[in-house]
Image (cartoon, helix red, strand yellow):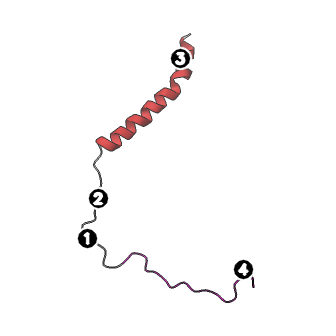
Amino acid sequence: MYALIVPASTPFVLLATVMALAWWEDHILPTPPTEPDEAPAEPPFPRRPQHRSQNSSVSTPR
C-alpha cells in the first residue's frame, strides 16, 4: 500500500517545489533596478532606411 503513495504524490511534490521556488524568487532574491543609472547616449540599434527593391521576386497584381 505504501508503494502506491510515492508515485501518486510525485506530481504534487514537484508542483510544491516549483511554487516554492517561484515564491523564493519573488520574495527573497534581490530585484534588479527598474531604471538604468544613465540613459544610453544613442539607441543601441540605429534604424536603417528600408529599401524597396524593384526586382522583387513577388509579383504585384496590375
Please tell me whether the stretch drawn in magenta is mainly helix, strand or loop: loop
**First of labels 3, 2 by sequence position:** 3
Q: CA distance from mark 2 to mark 1?
A: 12 Å
Q: Which residue is mark 4?
A: 58
- Residues 8 and 61: in front is 61
Q: Which residue is mark 3?
A: 5
Q: CA distance from mark 3 to mark 2?
A: 45 Å
For mark 1, give the secondary structure: loop
**Foreground tag (4 vs 2):** 4
Identify the residue at image location x=55%, y=21%.
8
Identify the residue at image location x=29%, y=41%.
27
Q: Is residue 59 magenta?
A: yes
Q: Percent from the top left, x then y, of residue 58?
A: 72, 80
Q: Which mark is residue 38?
A: 1
Identify the residue at image location x=75%, y=85%.
62
* The magenta segment: 43-62
**Foreground tag (3 vs 1):** 1
For mark 2, give the secondary structure: loop
Q: Which amino acid type is marked by label 4?
A: Val
- Does 29 sit left or right of 16 as displayed? left
**First of labels 4, 1 by sequence position:** 1
